[in-house]
Image (tube, rainbow, N blue to C red):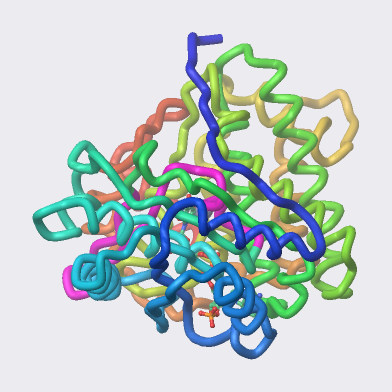
Amino acid sequence: MYNFTLHIPTTIHFGKGTISHLDELKNYGQKALLVYGGGSIKKNGIYDTAMDILKKSDIKVSELSGVEPNPRIETVRKGVEICKAESIDMILAIGGGSTIDCAKVIAAGAKYDGDAWDLVLDSSKITAALPIFDVLTLSATGTEMDPFAVISDLTKNEKWGTGSPFMVPTMSVLDPEYTYSVSKKQTAAGTADMMSHTMESYFTKENADCQKFMAEGLLRTMIKNGPIALNDPTNYDARANLMWAGTHAINGNIGAGSEPAWCVHPMEHELSAFYDITHGEGLAILTPAWMEHILNEDTLSNFVDFAKNVWGLTGNDDWALAHAGIDALKKFFFETMGLPANLRAVGITDDKNFDIMAQKACDGSKGSFAPLTKEDIIEIFKAAF
Ligand code: NZQ
Ligand code: ZN
């Protein structure tokens, strides 16, 4: 296990009614920018509840609505402008990963003199940020307890992740009831996303049993509770288990001490950058294709563990077990969770951009578990087509 430093400063308030903790914002100033998406928080009542608490806490609220799924740099710029013009003290994001990611870069942009896109391309330019608070409404990205944000400039087909300790939320409210209204499509995509985060750390050559067994427990939690939430959206325990597992998948715990591969995410970000697809759906399509591509003598034992410890499969033939584990994942994604099974199913109907997407994914990939060349990535895109 490599040396590591882990510092997770986010205060989590988890459970029913914990939105009441928004009154703590008054300790950070008087003016908040409320950031939200296309209106789900108005339909399910979270907006009214939050505004009521903020009003009672004497916090003056400015608003930025309309954050897009796959949030755009143009929306970040609007938020930064408001912060600077109105001397905002803190940001409150209410929504899914897109809204919270957008809020994070707004918070950093408010403390930066140049254009916010600089901060997406070069995280070392993030040297300060306004305090970030959030109420999470979709279990998926783990952004509620991590330093990352992913922002797109679709005019250039660019989608990049950035990260900074300054962008770790100060406080996150995780009320599983707020995810009851999440659609089947987004519940399935969110489950695939958190499973992918876990698997990106799980597939490593390091001997980090503690992290590995935690990852297996997280995957089993997601595999058990994803289908329950899909079929019974107001099942509190299923929503709660998914929410907490999703947070742990990427908060630094299971990736600490090893050098996680993070191979599939860079490939998916290219699909979203070129075709604006739902992140979790792209991951579900690519992950089994990636696994089949990298299964070899060297990686076999990882896939045997995956089959045995995650899917509960048994047998003496390692190769058969490894393939059965990947097949179990496919069945889970494409049958149990109803996720799209190939690129054509999400509207990618030709291969004309595979070359440029593979080049960019290759540049953005660490690929330490099973290094991928541009040609490997093109083959994975073709297999997923
Ligand atoms: O915009 P609203 O109206 O709120 O609707 C959203 C949106 O249409 C809806 N939704 C959210 N909560 C809801 C709800 N609908 C009903 N009830 C609720 N309670 O769901 C739709 C999708 O929301 P979005 O925020 O886009 O989804 P998600 O949380 O999956 O975030 C995806 C974004 O996060 C990035 C992805 O690339 C993508 O841009 N990621 C961020 C990461 C991070 N910060 O660490 C890591 C991830 O790997 C990922 O890349
Ligand atoms: Zn993800």
Residue at 36% across, 41% down:
166
Residue closer to the observer: 200 or 30: 30
Residue displayed at 66% across by 40% down: 248
Give the side of residue 350 with respect to residue 157, left or right.
right
Above or below, 290 against 209 in this view is below
The part of the image, by quadrant, that contains residue 316 is top right
Q: Is residue 151 magenta?
A: yes
Which quadrant would the N terminus be assigned to in this image?
top right
Across and down, in percent, residue 56 comes to 61, 73
Query: Relative to residue 43, is residue 181 depicted above or below?
Result: above
Check the image and name the residue furthest to the left. Answer: 114
**Residue shown at 24% from the left, 52% from the top:** 120
Residue drawn 70% across the image and 16% down it: 209
How many numbered badges does the structure rendering display?
0
Report x, y in % for residue 4. 49, 15
> Is residue 355 a member of the stretch shown in magenta?
no
Quadrant position of residue 139: bottom right
Residue 71 percent coordinates (x, y): 37, 70
**With 7 as the anchor, is 353 left or right in this view?**
left
Say whether residue 381 is visible: no
Front-lying residue, 57 or 163: 57
What residue range appears in magenta? 139-161
| Residue lying at the far bottom of the rendered structure | 43
Q: Can you see residue 187? A: yes
Q: Is residue 83 left or right of residue 195?
A: left
Please provide percent x and percent y for residue 353: 26, 66
